[in-house]
Image (cartoon, rainbow, N blue to C red):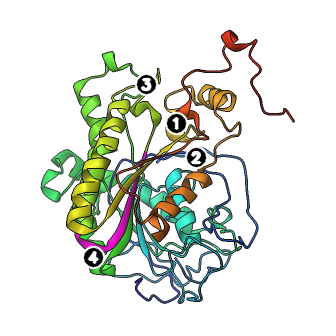
Amino acid sequence: MAATATPSTQLVTPKPCIYASRGISRSSFACFGNETKGTSLTTKLRSSSFTPATQSLSKTYDFNPLKFGKRGGIKAMAGASDKQPLPGLPVDLRGKRAFIAGIADDNGYGWAIAKSLAAAGAEILVGTWVPALNIFETSLRRGKFDESRVLPDGSLMEITKVYPLDAVYDCPEDVPEDVKANKRYAGSSNWTVKEVAESVKQDFGTIDILVHSLANGPEVVKPLLETSRYGYLAAISASSYSFVSLLKHFAPIMNPGGATISLTYIASEKIIPGYGGGMSSAKAALESDTKVLAFEAGRKHNIRVNTISAGPLRSRAAKAIGFIDMMIDYSLENAPLQKELTADEVGNAAAFLASPLASAITGAVVYVDNGLNAMGVGVDSPVFRDLDIPRAQQS
């Protein structure tokens, strides 16, 4: 159960990690029952790089006066949630607590997942890369994310606490001296994976949901044949082993029946020219690890482990490869569902996977890509110009 907190806001000190998640549009529907109350606020997709089941905050953060907890971290949780049963067959995560690693702004899959989990009633904790933490907290405090915090019922998503996190490092002994001396990390403490897990345990005791929304490939624009050993291993470390590390350190504080979710991409199993630097290998490793971890964490901790293979989106992370617009156009032309994918659709899939409705689903790669993964050929090819293939009506 989520810990009771008073309506306050609270700043936390920074600490590091390399994150990347993809774009988001402004609506979130986590209730899959007979009724979905409230209106969605949908805006254009925005790019990104890499945050409870309580009463909503006012339109701007109540940071006056600021209240500081012993561990810092933005605190924006208010009173107790309504425990009345929801109608129909809802995704009900009231009383659950989620830790989402990989949110540094309001433009990504991590943020979209946080919104859907919050809309379903979960309490939200966030892990943010140290160099991005100050900007993220400042923007949150000044209300710059208020529009994108709007949930389907009109309330604002609340973030109980933000932790500095660098998932590239497991424990303090792993951190090189040059990183410790880096001015971006000056004054930071307790930001390795092990330390953050210990901090969450100290602050809240347990969590129920763990989300891995992290990826980084420093040489992603290079073909695999031109990728250095350093670039390849860096992609694996930040994008796949980071999930193993997170689960290793958080599993002991997860309640039985808990769920973990990561984000992958179809390049793990099919060739996507231009998606280089070892990132395709990292995603393949992540999917393989998902199956093994589902067995190990399932047997040892009664925790489910799944990954979502999301389709292309215009985001800061996706723009790094340089041809995201062409990938989206290709998807629109060739996917079974001819529409642009929104981050909310990925967020809602994550809410379902984290809920009791998915209690028998583990070790799965769940495709949220308008069905593009099922296609064997591109039907927009001139080769198929004489075939009578239904196409979306142009507006």
Q: Tell me, yes or no, whether the highlighted magenta stretch contains residue 206.
A: no
Residue under the image location 76 percent in, 12 percent down: 386
Label 4: which residue? 201
Crowding at label 4, few (<14), some or many (≥20) Cα neighbours within 10 Å? some
Q: Which tag, 3 or 1, sits closer to the chain's start?
A: 3
Report the amino acid beneath label 2: Gly
Label 3: which residue? 221
Q: Which tag, 3 or 2, sits closer to the chain's start?
A: 2
Q: Which tag, 2 or 1, sits closer to the chain's start?
A: 2
Give the CA distance from mark 4 to mark 1.
34 Å
Q: Front-most of 366 and 47?
A: 366
Report the amino acid beneath label 4: Lys
Label 2: which residue? 23
Image position of 255 with respect to 82: above or below: above
Label 1: which residue? 318
Q: Secondary structure at mark 2?
A: loop
Give the CA distance from mark 2 to mark 1.
8 Å
Magenta segment, which residues?
A: 252-263
Residue 145 spot, x, y in % from top left: 61, 62
Residue 150 spot, x, y in % from top left: 67, 67
Crowding at label 3, few (<14), some or many (≥20) Cα neighbours within 10 Å? some
Report the amino acid beneath label 3: Val
Instruction: Name the side, left or right, on which 59 lies relative to 181.
Output: right
